């Protein structure tokens, strides 16, 4: 039995044989009422959409300790902050980031990703109540791991996913592959980024660790 969940939630229910998919998002009380009306209490999966459930309790703890805090140092003096004047648009942000070792990394090429991906051994298939394609999902997770650990990117373009991993993803390509990735996105397993006509997908941590 799932633990009680409060706040914003997502309910997902799938019936593969009849091609039924139900996704409901909203406040937990409202979503649970809908689930009850549809007699789906014992079916599907309910997951929280909140980031950190402990945030409120942490904040309350910090607030309650304010009275016990002594001097926090001298009163801030804005006049002591040096003023730097420069023409508008003259700041080279990229070079500044590079100086501090925080420059954005270049996205990997298809060749670089393929070289790393082709060296992988077959992973353990994904498991769970919402997994319909255990092995393709496992291969996709491995591809995202390469992007993050080897190249420092959190998303990969659709073109890279298709070119590098299509054969391992049940040989899906084109529209079929895009619809499959979109389905994983709607199930809360992937995140999606669009820039014009370019589409990128990235993993949701909970799915990667499942």
Image (cartoon, rainbow, N blue to C red):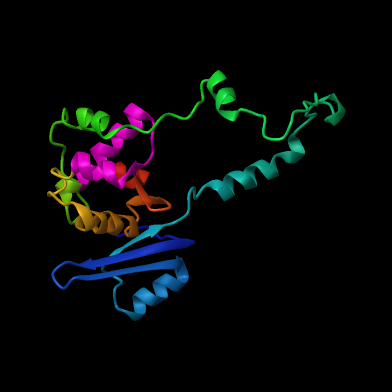
Left or right: residue 171 compared with residue 150: left
Judging depth in this view, the residue of 73 and 17 nearest the camera is 17
Quadrant (top left/top right/bottom left/bottom right) for the N terminus:
bottom left
Which residues fall within the magenta stretch?
Answer: 137-165
Query: Does the image show residue 210?
Result: no
Query: Does the image show residue 88?
Result: yes
Q: Residue at x 38, y 53 (%)?
A: 197
Q: Residue at x 30, y 42 (%)?
A: 208
The percent position of residue 27, horizontal first and vertical second, equals 48, 67
The percent position of residue 77, horizontal first and vertical second, equals 85, 29
The overriding secondary structure of the stretch rendered in magenta is: helix
Judging depth in this view, the residue of 127 and 182 nearest the camera is 182
The percent position of residue 202, horizontal first and vertical second, equals 35, 45
Left or right: residue 190 compared with residue 180: right
Q: Residue at x 35, y 80 (%)?
A: 37
On whether residue 157 falls in the magenta region, the answer is yes
Left or right: residue 204 compared with residue 91: left
Give the image quarter of residue 78.
Answer: top right
Farthest top residue in view: 99
Judging depth in this view, the residue of 172 and 174 nearest the camera is 174
């Amino acid at each position: 039995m799932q633990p009680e969940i409060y706040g914003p939630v997502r309910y997902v229910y799938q019936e593969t044989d009849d091609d039924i998919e139900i996704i409901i998002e909203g406040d937990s009380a409202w979503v649970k009422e809908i689930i009850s009306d549809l007699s789906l209490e014992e079916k599907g999966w309910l997951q929280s959409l909140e980031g950190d459930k402990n945030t409120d309790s942490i904040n309350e703890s910090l607030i309650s300790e304010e009275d016990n805090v002594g001097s926090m140092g001298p009163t801030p003096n804005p006049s002591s902050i040096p003023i730097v004047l420069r023409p508008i648009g003259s700041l080279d942000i990229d070079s500044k980031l590079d100086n501090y070792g925080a420059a954005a990394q270049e996205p990997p090429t298809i060749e670089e990703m393929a070289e790393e991906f082709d060296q992988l051994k077959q992973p353990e298939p994904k498991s769970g109540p919402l997994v319909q394609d255990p092995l393709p999902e496992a291969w996709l997770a491995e591809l995202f791991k390469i992007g993050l650990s080897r190249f420092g990117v959190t998303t990969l373009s659709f073109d890279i996913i298709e070119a590098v991993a299509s054969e391992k993803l049940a040989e899906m390509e084109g529209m079929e592959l895009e619809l499959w990735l979109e389905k994983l996105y709607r199930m809360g397993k992937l995140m999606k980024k669009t820039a014009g006509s370019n589409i990128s997908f990235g993993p949701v941590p909970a799915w990667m660790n499942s």
